[in-house]
Image: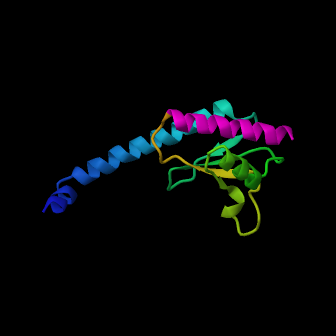
Amino acid sequence: MIMDDFLTNGTFDRHLRRMRGIMRNRVVDMARMITNSFPPGTKISSPQGGYVLWVQMGEGVDGFELSRRAKEAGVSILPGEICSSTGAYKNCIRLSCWHPWSVELEEGITKLANIVAELQDG
């Protein structure tokens, strides 16, 4: 009965609207942090239908190497090449924006930005 009430009286719709707003803000906050901390020339897009960011770095940055170094620093990312059946997107990564903003998340983005800068400087 509780679930029936939740689904039929509008509570669920209000919950979804609230969560969409929260998630949209998380994507915007993370994009802003990336823009402010990653090397110049980094491009960011937010694919429709999810709460992730697609980050394209300079051609000299290898997503798998970035992923390896990021993991050593305690940061989890998805190399872009995994999202391609043709080996494209070698210099891209996908970042999830699901987690609430925190000091740890901000530190992780800063660590990631520093690694990207090291890889670009080669």
Q: Is residue 97 above or below residue 107?
A: below
Residue 51 percent across, percent down from the top left? 50, 50
Residue 116 is drawn in which quadrant?
Answer: top right
Q: Residue furthest top?
A: 36
**Is 104 one of the magenta-colored residues?**
yes
Answer left or right for 114 relative to 105.
Answer: right
The answer to which of 60 and 66 lies nearer the viewer is: 66
The answer to which of 68 and 15 lies nearer the viewer is: 68
Q: Residue furthest bottom?
A: 85
Q: Is residue 28 above or below residue 6?
A: above
Q: Which residue is drawn at 66% across and 62% down?
A: 83
Residue 2 percent across, percent down from the top left? 15, 59
Residue 33 percent across, percent down from the top left? 59, 33
The answer to which of 74 and 85 lies nearer the viewer is: 74
Q: Residue at x 77, y 37 (%)?
A: 117
Quadrant including the C terminus: top right
**Is 11 one of the magenta-colored residues?**
no
Residue 3 is drawn in which quadrant?
Answer: bottom left
Magenta-colored segment: predominant secondary structure: helix
In magenta, the rendered stretch is 103-122
Residue 14 percent across, percent down from the top left? 27, 47
The answer to which of 93 and 9 lies nearer the viewer is: 93
Q: Residue at x 48, y 37 (%)?
A: 101
Answer left or right for 97 relative to 15.
Answer: right
Answer left or right for 121 relative to 25.
Answer: right
Q: Is residue 14 above or below residue 86?
A: above
